[in-house]
Amino acid sequence: MPTARTHRALLGPGLLALSLALAAPAAAQTAIPFGPDLESAGWDAITFRGIPATTYAARDADTLDVVAEGSSSVIAKRLPPSAFDATAASWRWRVEEGPPATDLARRGGDDRALALYFAFAPEGDRASAEAGRSSLRSLLLSGRGRLLVYVFGGVGTRGQIVENPYARGRGVYVIRRPADAALGTWHSEEVDLAADHRAAFGEAPGILVGLAVASDSDDTGGRNVGVIEGVQVR
């Protein structure tokens, strides 16, 4: 039977750990703004030759409206140094209209209602990233970056990881809501970026330097209508 001394020995470290956890400050949280307008909030458009651009518009600082009509394009933003060490993210999104279920692994047939990209650079790029010399495009072209892309759309199950056919070995899709998820309803997301990065690439993430949003309907020729709001990293 445990003695009082044993109880003290067992409880002491646990109580100490609990007190330290309660006293420790919460991880810094960084809100990612879309407004008052995309340009002033630091978002840049990435378009594709011969394909109409998707329409993105800031409704307010926290909310992005997205409409794709037989189109495809991306908006991307550099993140501030306060976000570099983030290991988790949250947001909510709603799709009013979306493409049919598509095979996300098939290049040229992977339309998605909404996609949220998290771009990571190696730790060695921290100084250049702090100086504003990193971009989603340069990371991919150099082969040094890694992309986690959370998707509303596609065929699959929640949490399924699919290789990104446009960034093999460097990027994956993570299905958060498959194409048959309820439309016209807000869906809240909480993701563990570090755990998903390890699952996808077999290693811990570097620094989180960029964020991007995409919606495409150029392959299926349909119309996507959606909203993303309240994006935060921590």
Image: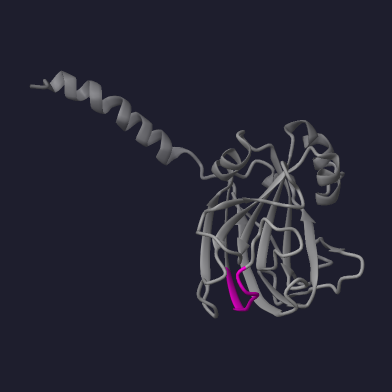
**Residue 78 in view of the camera:** yes
Residue occupying the point 73% across, 78% down: 67
Residue sitting at the far right: 49
Residue 125 shown left or right of residue 195 in the figure? right
Task: Determine the image quadrant of residue 142.
Answer: top right
Which residue occupies the foreground of this view, 90 or 197? 197
Residue 191: x and y in percent read 54, 52
Quadrant location of the N terminus in the rendered image: top left
Residue 152 shown left or right of residue 7 in the figure? right
Magenta region, residue range: 93-101
Q: Is residue 99 magenta?
A: yes
Q: Is 3 rendered above or below residue 22?
A: above
Q: Is residue 185 magenta?
A: no
Residue 230 shown left or right of residue 1 in the figure? right
Residue 4 shown left or right of residue 184 in the figure? left
Which residue occupies the foreground of this view, 42 or 119? 119
Q: Is 213 rendered above or below residue 146?
A: below
Residue sitting at the far left: 1
Q: Is 25 rendered above or below residue 106?
A: above
**Residue 41 in view of the camera:** no
Task: Determine the image quadrant of residue 23.
Answer: top left
Which residue occupies the foreground of this view, 84 or 196? 196
Task: Determine the image quadrant of residue 10.
Answer: top left
Residue occupying the point 54% across, 78% down: 183
Which residue occupies the foreground of this view, 183 or 26? 183
Residue 20: x and y in percent read 41, 34
Residue 162: x and y in percent read 62, 51
Residue 13: x and y in percent read 32, 25
Q: Looking at the image, how many numbered discs can be counted on the residues?
A: 0
